[in-house]
Image (cartoon, rainbow, N blue to C red):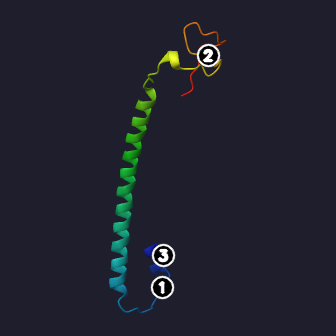
Amino acid sequence: MDPIKLVKSIPSGTKIEGLRESLIKIFYDHEIQMSLSAGVAKIFATDLSNLSKRLRTNQKRGVSFDASETICSVCKEPISIDCKCPREPFLII
């Protein structure tokens, strides 16, 4: 709840006992909540950046496999230099 909207909804001239102390606490709590939200957003942004970099690095790496035991995804024959596939041998990982 937005404390400013709450205060504006109180009719002018209305006397409410303990209102001042309650409003101070509401504003203080709201300020803490906004500060925590900003901190969490910074942490998420940093985590997102770090994880994205790690993902890109891992995606660039080669994948080791034994070609003699690997089947071409197009012609279904073992991958080799003599592959008779109309295209270059293709491997789906």
Q: Which mark is residue 5?
A: 3
**x and y percentages locating residue 11 in the rendered image:** 49, 87
Residue lying at 60% horizontally and 13% vertically, measured from the top left:
88
Marked residue nearer the N-terminal end (1 or 2) = 1
**x and y percentages locating residue 14 in the rendered image:** 45, 91
Q: Helix, strand, or loop for circle 1? A: loop
Q: Residues within 10 Å of mark 3 (few under 14, many from 20)?
A: few
Q: Residue furthest top?
A: 82
- Mark 3 against mark 2, which lies toward the viewer? 2
Residue 5 in the image: above or below residue 76: below
Q: Helix, strand, or loop for circle 3? A: helix
Specify whether 88 is left or right of 22: right
Residue indicated by mark 1: 10
Residue lying at 53% horizontally and 28% vertically, measured from the top left:
93
Q: Helix, strand, or loop for circle 2? A: loop
Residue indicated by mark 2: 77
- Amino acid type shown at disc 2: Glu
Residue lying at 37% horizontally and 51% vertically, measured from the top left:
42
- Amino acid type shown at disc 1: Ile
Quick one: 29 or 70, which is closer to the camera? 70
